Image (spheres, helix red, strand yellow):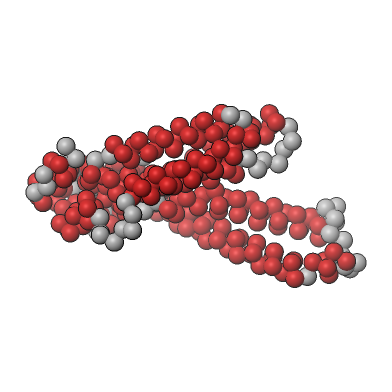
Amino acid sequence: MNTLSKLINFVSSENALEKNSMHRLYENLNGTGKEVMPKSLKLYILAGFSWLICLISGAKGVGFPITASIIILGVFIGYARSKPYFKNAAYTISVYLITQTAVLFFFSVWMPWRNPDLTKIFAITYILLGYALSFYIIRIRLIENVQINYLINDGKLIRKRKTIKVLKIVAAILGVSLVVAMLVTRIYTMNSDWWNNSDNYDYSYDSFAGTIIYVFSLFIGLANLALFTLFPTSLLKASVVVNGLIYKKYSADFQKEYEFTDKEWYGE
């Protein structure tokens, strides 16, 4: 988070106050009034459902659901202990982390190897790599957002331009791969008899056509696995988190400017 921290530090108190009105701060503290149920209750439900999903990973060893349970509990405690001014940011972070944990531990069960030790190693590697890629994408999204919302007028401060573009291209490729997979599945379903009974082509792995189909299928499969694995990153509202970080940095300035009480602002 070194680059993100530096960018947050570049945001002046005057700029932060200018970008955040009294109305925005009020909604941040009290909500919009359109919520069907309290966020804490929604988080309870999500955490419970995600925990049940993570229990499936017990098929690979008791350590998997225990680790997932600790992560989910830790995230929920972090949300419960967050200050009122940071509660919105803590909520979207919690939704993302809990969902990401459920997805990673769920997919870790479906490893193809029959060797138990190899399966566990691959499952652990998948979980760690999934978290690493997910955190990296979130970091880049936050860097992009703080620049767009607070530093857009200072071109010298812009960071990670190329990385942001590359991630957008990769996201587009993953999206296209999902569409292609759905279309191919549909076409195959409609013409399965012709494919299975056709004597015109050899589709075995040893043939050229079979190799092409195998490589294509492998690419589409891995692309879709990556898409579903990293889907939770889309649940995090980057602007809300960035605003929360700004509120935290200039918490005293915001409280003084808009005359919030300690109870309203800090929950004390």
In this rendering, would 72 be left or right of 26? right
At 51% from the left and 49% from the top, the residue drawn is 230
At 31% from the left and 58% from the top, the residue drawn is 35
In this rendering, would 226 be left or right of 158? right
**Residue 164 % position (x, y):** 43, 54
Residue 74 image-quadrant placement: top left
**Residue 237 % position (x, y):** 36, 53
Q: How many labels does the image show?
A: 0
At 60% from the left and 54% from the top, the residue drawn is 224
Quadrant of image for the N terminus: top left
In this rendering, would 258 be left or right of 104? left
At 63% from the left and 40% from the top, the residue drawn is 109
**Residue 59 % position (x, y):** 64, 35
**Residue 36 % position (x, y):** 33, 58
Residue 123 image-quadrant placement: top right
The residue closer to the viewer here, 179 or 67, is 67
The residue closer to the viewer here, 46 or 167, is 46
Image position of 64 with respect to 15: above or below: above
**Residue that lies at the very extreme toward the right in this rendered image:** 199
Q: Could one spot residue 20 in this view of the protein?
A: no
The residue closer to the viewer here, 100 or 181, is 100
Image position of 207 with respect to 9: above or below: below
The residue closer to the viewer here, 139 or 85, is 85
In this rendering, would 196 be left or right of 52? right
Quadrant of image for the C terminus: top left
Image position of 144 with respect to 56: above or below: below
Q: Could one spot residue 67 in this view of the protein?
A: yes
